[in-house]
Amino acid sequence: AQKITQTQPGMFVQEKEAVTLDCTYDTSDPSYGLFWYKQPSSGEMIFLIYQGSYDQQNATEGRYSLNFQKARKSANLVISASQLGDSAMYFCAMREGSGYSTLTFGKGTMLLVSP
Amino acid sequence: EAGVTQFPSHSVIEKGQTVTLRCDPISGHDNLYWYRRVMGKEIKFLLHFVKESKQDESGMPNNRFLAERTGGTYSTLKVQPAELEDSGVYFCASSGRWNEQFFGPGTRLTVL
């Protein structure tokens, strides 16, 4: 079974609107971490936000917030007030365990922001 | 503070040739990871170093791939001999406080 599922291959949003990128995960480990990365056309992977499985509050970093629904095993990324520069590929990833273990990535969602 | 750097940014080689990719992690990061994204597929883990030791190399596709991290600083990933299916983008990452992994810009490898 897929450990990280991103069901939206592509999303379109207008500038200044909010957008939610979906991510569901599958793990039996009680300790895990969830990450979102942005990959613009230039190719680099940019870390956006992190949510730990024991964190009580949803993570926020500027215009990015993570809607963490633990019972549903979902970790959706919300981008408020989209900007043209937000157009990129977005990857959800998970680390299982509490140590320095590897990341498992979803297939990604391509976000296009139009003027 | 400098980020993760990778060299070269692009490499085009012929099938059967050897290529060596280099990664310089963020200074002080003991954990270093290699990942690969083949066209149209997910980013897949290759291996994980803690300092100079291989912590997990379960993702290495076959014995044509050899990774080293002598001295626990930079790492190299050698593909010898390269095959067509090795084409893709090879990412290196090093770990921060939460194991958020800071990625390098990647090396795009094309095997003809």
Image: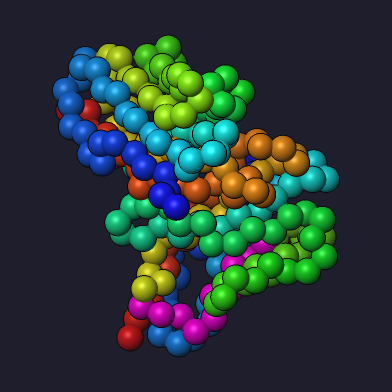
Of residue B36 and residue A106, the one placed in the foreground of this image is B36
The spot of residue B53 in percent (x, y) is 57, 19
Residue A46 visible in the snapshot = yes
> What residue is rendered at 34% in x and 30% in y?
B22
> Which residue shows up at 65% across the image and 68% down it?
A66
Q: What stretch is highlighted in magenta?
A: A75-84
**Residue B12 appears in which quarter of the rendering?**
top left
Q: Where is residue A2 in the image (x, y as percent from the top left)?
A: 62, 43
Q: In this view, does A68 lie to the left or right of B33?
A: right
Q: Position of residue B109 (x, y in %)?
A: 27, 34
Q: Is residue A31 magenta-colored?
A: no
Q: In which quarter of the image is residue A114?
A: bottom left
Numbered marks: total = 0
> Is A40 positioned to the left or the right of A31 in the image?
left
Nearest to the observer: residue A28 or residue A54? A54
Residue in front for this viewpoint, B33 or A25: B33
Q: Quadrant of residue B107?
A: top left
Q: Nearer the viewer, residue B37 or A37?
A: A37
Colour mode of the rendering: rainbow
Q: In this view, does B60 lie above or below A114?
A: above
> Where is residue B14 drawn, in percent x and y?
16, 23
Image quarter of the C terminus of chain B: top left
In the image, what residue occupies the spot 40% across and 36% down? B24
Q: In this view, does A18 lie above or below B67?
A: below
**Image height check: is B79 above or below A89?**
above
Residue at left offset 78%, top offset 69%: A57
Whether residue B41 is visible here, answered yes or no, is no
